[in-house]
Amino acid sequence: MSNRNATGRTKPESGRGTRATAGAAALVLGLAAVLAAPATAQAAGPAAAGGSLREPPHAHLAHGEDSVRYVSIKGCRTKDDVPRPCGGWRVVMHSGARGTLPDAQTTARDAKGKPVEGVAAPVAVSGDGRRIAYFTKSGRLAVRTLGGGVRLPAENALPKAGPAETALQLSDDGSRLAVSFTTEKPRDTLIFDTETGDRIGTIPAAYELKGFSADGGEVLAGTEDDEGTQVLLAYSDAGQELARVTPPQLVASNGPQALSGDGRTVAAVVRGSKQQLALYDMVNDQVTARLKVKLPAGDAEMVDWTGPSQVTVHLMRYHATKPTSVTIAQIDSGTGKVTIRDTYTLLKDTFVFAACGG
């Protein structure tokens, strides 16, 4: 559950990658070559290498190698001073290297292929930062693997809906892609295997997708009943309902929630003067833990299980005159200990961005 887009005023990244050494410059060129591979390269058949990138050690050992930190699109203003996306998607790596997605749609288009002014096309990054999902300029759904190729599901894989009415989410390991819709007529959320491009499951249109479990084998969904009470549901990636509960207020009022790899344990971060990590068992309908935690300042906009006993939280700080800053905190779900994994500031001209999760 690691791929939510966010908006914010931004400032230049604080020093990292702004002065490229010869080695860093070569890495940028290598990254650009990999990301520029045509989106038709892997339209069918098993994914194969579409270019080679010798990647430096990742700044954070959780990933092992360099990976995508976030993707960002520049914001410009119309003659009427209305903000809009412009230029292409920029890919910012943990190492500081940067590349682009030259085949990716920027301004979202509707079902008839017409641009929707002021709306950026959807993009998602897998939790491990190894895959990016997006729509090509021709309107095809695509999943690009860092250092590999591009997978295009079948042309008729999606119902008739434009990218402007579509949202994308990748699992932490990038093996699953969820496509949900905001069309006037409700549509089921579709789950795809990113290796094959095949659709493997659906989630009923009545429920909002909240994200994947830690291992990608399940998804968390939710809705409100007639009385406005939150309902949570767990589904397998094939679309089988596993659990349906009305969670206690402690969980319901502290989103976003995240589903563990066990397919039943939900994590919710309680903010305020008494910060807590609440764990809730959907099968037994029971709060199993309320751990005191101390998190940095910021809005908890992304919460993900990134291991059997680790919950990762993206904290965003939006500023009136400065760009958005991001802090990524990891919480030990057994002890409540908090470790800061990463901090960064978005490119100053960012209109919207999509970050990795883990």
Image (cartoon, rainbow, N blue to C red):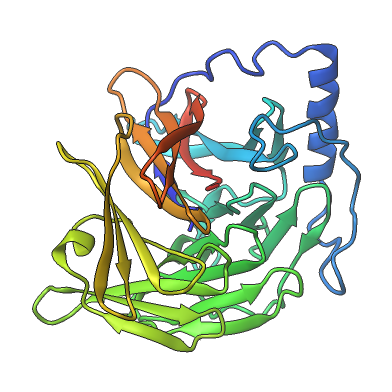
Q: Where is residue 221 in the image (x, y as percent from the top left)?
A: 37, 73
| Residue 19 as seen in the image, left or right of residue 114 | right
Q: In which quarter of the image is residue 225?
A: bottom left
Residue 201 visible in rendering: yes
Q: Where 301 falls versus 61 (above or below)?
A: below
Q: In which quarter of the image is residue 156?
A: bottom right
Taking the view exactly as shown, the residue that stands out farthest to the bottom is 240
Name the side, left or right, on which 262 lies relative to 286: right
- Tell me the residue at 74%/68% (across/down): 152
Q: How many labels does the image show?
A: 0
Residue furthest to the front: 335
User: Which one is in front, 230 or 142?
Assistant: 230
Q: Going 49% across and 40% down the picture, which residue do you hit?
A: 85
Asked whether residue 89 is in view, the answer is: no
Q: Which residue is drawn at 45% across and 54% down?
A: 304
Q: Work out whether 180 lies above or below 307.
A: below
Give the side of residue 334 with respect to residue 41, left or right: left
Res 337 → quadrant: top left
| Place of residue 258 in the rendered image (x, y in percent of width and height, measured from the top left) | 40, 60
Tell me residue 334's x, y (percent). 40, 52
In this orientation, which residue lies closer to the viewer: 219 or 267? 267
**Whole-percent x, y for residue 264 in the image:** 41, 74
316 or 162, nearer to the observer? 316
In the displayed structure, would residue 128 be above or below residue 216? above
- Asked whether 268 or 18 is in front, the reply is 268
